[in-house]
Image (cartoon, rainbow, N blue to C red):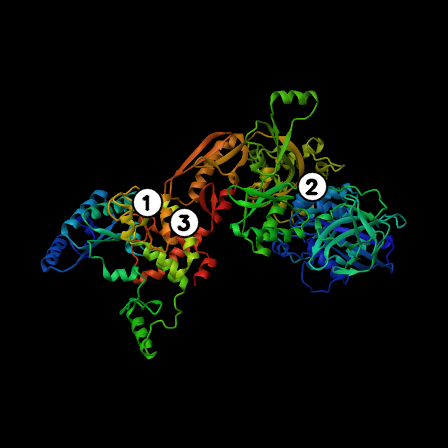
Amino acid sequence: MFPPERIRNFCIIAHIDHGKSTLADRLMQLTGAVPAGSRPQYLDKLQVERERGITIKAQTASLVYRHADGHDYLLNLIDTPGHVDFSYEVSRSLAACQGALLLVDASQGVQAQTVANFYLAFEQELALLPLLNKTVANFYLAFEQELALLPLLNKVDLPSADPAAVAAQMAATFDVVPSDVLAVSAKTGLGLRELLPAVVERIPPPAGQPSQPLRLLLFDAFHDEYRGVVCLVAVVDGRLRAGDKLAAASSGSEYEALEVGILAPEPHPTGELLTGQVGYVIPGIKDVKAARVGDTWHLARQPVEPLPGFKPIKPMVFAGLYPASADDYEGLAAAIERLGLNDASVTVKKETSDALGAGFRCGFLGPLHLEVFLTRLQQEHSADVISTAPTVPYEVELAGDPQHQQQQQQQGKEKQRLVLESVAEYPRNQKVSAIYEPTVLATIIVPQQYCGAVMKLAVARRGTQLDYSFMGGSSSSSSSSSIDSAGNSSASAAAADEHAGSSSSSSTQDGVDVLSAAAEAADTGDSSSSSSSAGFLASDRVLLRYQLPLAELAGDFYSKLKSATQGYASFDYEEGPLRPADLTLLELLVNGKAVDALGRLVPTGDAVRLGRALTARMRTLLDRQQYEVVIQASAGGRIVARETMKALRKDVTAKCYGGDVSRKRKLLQKQKEGKKRLRQLGGLSVPAEVFPELLKP
Amino acid sequence: MGVQSFQEDLLKACGRSHSLADVYAAIEAVTATGLPSWSLDLISGLPGLSLQGWQHSLQQAVAAGPDHISVYDLQVEEGTPFARWFSGEGSPLPKEPEAVAMFEAASATLTAAGYEHYEISNYAKPGHRSKHNQVYWQCQPYYAFGLGAASYTRGRRFSRPRGMQEYEAWVKRFVQGGAGCPAAELPVESKEEQLLDVIMLSLRLSDGLALQQLQQQYGQETVAALLPTIQGFLQQGLMQVLPCDAEDVQQAGDAIVPGLSGSSGTVEVDADAAYMQLCDRLQRGKDVSVRLTDPAGFLLSNDVISELFAQLDSRTLSKAV
């Protein structure tokens, strides 16, 4: 068995596509957990994950490693989700670890998301093992040899690796000593033999108390078809045995530990887990939502101090989901339930729309979560779904009547606020005194030359700048200062020296002074500039932080950001505070009647323009009806746009003789099929496939 | 007689091989022979055709005194020279409102001149309806011979190859196979296909769709599935109910029976009353038919028919078989 001193719990922090899964595969192969040559990216189980090359569910693998001291060590590798929407899950996985491999792709450099996760890890005071993946040369050995390397690029549109620049970046961004950096290539196996000993020596063992009552951190849960809900846990204190009666700190609910074991990486029932170990427990529950990520579990009737950091699920983006044809409702309900079995973070409520009939309002952690859910719904359950435009939870303050208001003010009560999960809930018959919108704090990292474009986009989307700092990269080779379209001269290398002195706009967080370190790095990295290929990493990069409306994220901000920066921007966000917003309800009316599914809250200044665009779009997308149709847009009760569709008057086949009969019948059957797919939208017959277009932002 | 138009410039523009003079000469010849029955074709929707010009052609057609007139709207088929010449913006083809006006003008002018508008595109003096074509519209079987000819025998609709080589090859195979029913290897048409054909073709005729017979042949559920939609079309003025036996008309006396309309003259149609009459007659086992109105119903016939098709889902159809 493994005493805590011979256990190491660690994870890999990396940006999406930087080779984390490949490295994990390699570690498993090295320790014999998985045979060499087995299916790559072993940990990415879900089909959609494989297709998109990202990890969504976090999974662990326990590896046994014989160290140089002759002892066996239990290394628990905890895989973490790789994308923005799941940072809470990442933070809970980190809470189960004592160390992290900080993985950066040498051909891409430091990305915004790694920064975010770095700060998470830093807050938890995890020891960091910075790694440089796919290095060309060991920059701290500097001049002795250049390792020839087969450049294996994850993204062929980016230039080849520039490890020197990236290491300098890492030193600048993470305040690590460059000589601590290990160069590996997960694909070729380079440097991996040094990695495992480093893990043993440089990551501390877990510090729990075997003698204390049981304290478990539940850091993930999933639904298995045969076993029900499986919970991944870290034993912080005490010991867990199969048969133990457990209780969840957040709810008080009690469960029995039917099966206990480790993941190696397949589940292996060992019957017990000791202090410091990481593994699984099957508590005999059917609903995965009962197993709350971040919760503390303990022995029933032996409550303990709950572990910090637990947050109940808070959906950030909502969408209405409706069956494409009315008689598919049951099928859709069943499909959503099936998906929900394995996704504790989706919230589901029933909803009806005048236009679309009976459906569901689902809440997601973010826009990617929504997208992945919809894709899985389509793929795994072959259900045709109409999804309305994503909405965010606005809060609306009601004016109320003056008398009542006075009363409330006297009593010191706050004004009454309504939370809107869908625009249909907007109080049309009451006076609204203020609207509050949820915001996010976004971190964007771009090469300098795109800085202006990003700023322009952020401002256009009602973003407020919070921070601007120069991250540096390689040295003066990029001294060309670019004047962007806004007429601002972005920080060139020369200016960087100035900035290095004053720490005004540096993102000084927790002691990391980015700019001065960058200036240092620029000096030390000088020798490598000549050998580095011109391109992406040769240009200096800028870190921007903005407070943005969450609604913009649920729209197309991310894709606009990517196209404005030719894909070079990296983006991460965290939940921000509510803020007051100047928004108006924009409604679409068909022959005088508002269509609830098409209403939306828009910035007041945009109402007229959007109203015109939407009515025009409706007119082009809809088929003509047998009567005249008047389409209007109304903002704040005022008509701002109008379009007319003339009635259909002619749809006739002139000739139908002998040889024509079969053909004409088939044509009419096709026309019939089209009619069957029509949904009633405000009294109009609208083909179901038109809905997504109508509902786009 | 394929006149198509009584305007010289249009005939030229369309590349027709005859002139206006040829047209009048032909009319004279036919009249002189004293044929028992002859028909004249017109095409509306020709490029460059105005409503005025159309009216002129209609009047000339009436003046020529045929027993039967066919009026077709030009259908521009993809890949034809017409499609190449006349598609897109600025096309000289009449726009939809004009095309509608031309259809309405034909109906008004020809019925006023004593022709019955008995099929969407066909008008006939009493007793001169096309016997040949009615076989098609009444879903009756018929033989065929020759290139591209279509037959409907033993429950199979079959068109012969159009090209000479393919046709000869087909004939050879047919004879070698012992002749008999062509397309014997094809399945007999299903009851569903029959039903759809009956609906589609009957509604092309002013005699309309006989609902009592439909009920007898395809089941009560079938007709029941159609009734709500029929009611809707009655209310929209796209369909009307037809009176049937003299008995009913007599019972109503000299007063015009509200809800039922004759084929001549205009009658105040109360859609709800008509619907009630319809249901009542069905229930009592009496014959009753619905037809598309002229011109509105005819003009939207595809829309109406496909809507009726949409009411017949697989469950209803399976009960009909």
- Chain of the residue displaying label 3: B
User: Residue B170: image x %, image y %?
Assistant: 32, 73
Which marked residue is nearer to the observer: mark 2 or mark 3?
A: 3
Residue A653 higher or lower than A612, as above or below: below
Q: Quadrant of residue A398?
A: top right
Could you tell me which secondary element the residue under label 1 belongs to?
Answer: loop
Could you tell me which secondary element the residue under label 2 belongs to?
Answer: helix
**Residue placed under numbered mark 3 in the picture:** B229
- Chain of the residue displaying label 2: A
User: Residue A644: image x %, image y %?
Assistant: 39, 37
**Residue placed under numbered mark 2 in the picture:** A522
User: Residue A590: image x %, image y %?
Assistant: 45, 38
Tell which of B109 and B265 is nearer to you.
B265
Which marked residue is nearer to the observer: mark 3 or mark 1?
A: 1
- Tell me if mark 3 has few (under 14), some (14-19) or many (20+) residues whose alpha carbon lies within 10 angstroms of its own: some
In this figure, what is the number of numbered marks?
A: 3
User: In the rendered view of the protein, which quadrant contains the C terminus of chain B?
Assistant: bottom left
**Residue placed under numbered mark 1 in the picture:** B259
Q: Quadrant of residue A467?
A: top right
Residue depicted at x 57% and y 27%:
A431
Q: Is residue A456 visible?
A: yes
User: In the rendered view of the protein, which quadrant contains the N terminus of chain B?
Assistant: bottom left
Are labels 3 and 1 on one chain?
A: yes
Amino acid type of the residue that numbered disc 3 sits on in the rendered structure: Thr
Q: Is residue B303 visible?
A: no
Q: Is residue A51 left or right of residue A252?
A: left
